Image (cartoon, rainbow, N blue to C red):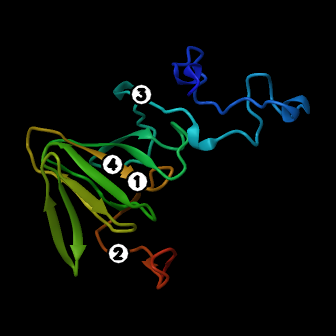
Amino acid sequence: MPDQAAASPDPTGTADRAPVAKGPSAAEGTATGPDEPTPQEFDAFHRRLHQIRPAGLSAHTAQTEGMRRVEALSGTTVGTERLWMGQTHVAPATRSANHHHGVSETGIYVVSGHPAFVFLREEEEIRLETSPGDYIYVPPWVPHREENPDPEAEAVVVIARTTQEAIVVNLADLRWRGPAKTSDGGRTWHTD
């Protein structure tokens, strides 16, 4: 029968810790204290969760003219290793500067407004018109810009990137200036 004490809530707030060493390893002094696990027993997979409320969003992140980014989850805010997540706000009747996000892949979710995402395909500007609930994928190194054609309402999107911090490289235009994938399935990049 399962131990009922193990299934009950932890009033001490230490439920995210690994079990404390028992037996010889604790007696040998390898534990950091009576309530701390040994380094061998620390399970990095079972660490605490983090909650960031709207008031906790930080504007101390890379910016592009014509838009305002705020970060929620990053290496700086919660210690992420391969994720950056935040919001972008584009004012009414505004377009951002041209930019790319380096090696980072970017996923975008449209929260409000009808922003357009613009990039070049064979020297022709392509506009992806969006509505709330739409998703946009921006591959690494692809120059693009956001536009908000609405004369009255701000456009807001949630962004997730595959790097620990926001990478933003502002550009004069939408022409490709980044590296290309190698023939090894895209695991590395090279510049021409």
Amino acid type, callout 2: Trp
| Residue of label 3 | 56
Element marked by disc 4: strand
Residue farthest to the right? Answer: 28
Residue farthest to the left? Answer: 151
Relative side of 32 to 96, left or right: right
Q: Give the quarter of the image for residue 136.
A: bottom left
Q: CA distance from mark 2 to mark 4?
A: 22 Å
Amino acid type, callout 1: Arg
| Residue of label 1 | 161
| Residue of label 4 | 159
Depth order, front residue of 140/32: 32
Instruction: Name the spot of residue 60 as percent of width and height, x first.
Output: 45, 38
| Residue of label 2 | 176
Q: CA distance from mark 3 to mark 1?
A: 19 Å
Q: Mark 4 or mark 3, which is nearer the start of the sequence?
A: 3
Amino acid type, callout 3: Gly
Relative side of 22 to 3, left or right: right
Amino acid type, callout 4: Ile
Q: Residues within 10 Å of mark 4 (few under 14, many from 20)?
A: many
Q: Cβ–Cβ below 8 Å for labels 1 and 4?
A: yes
Q: Residues within 10 Å of mark 2 (few under 14, many from 20)?
A: some
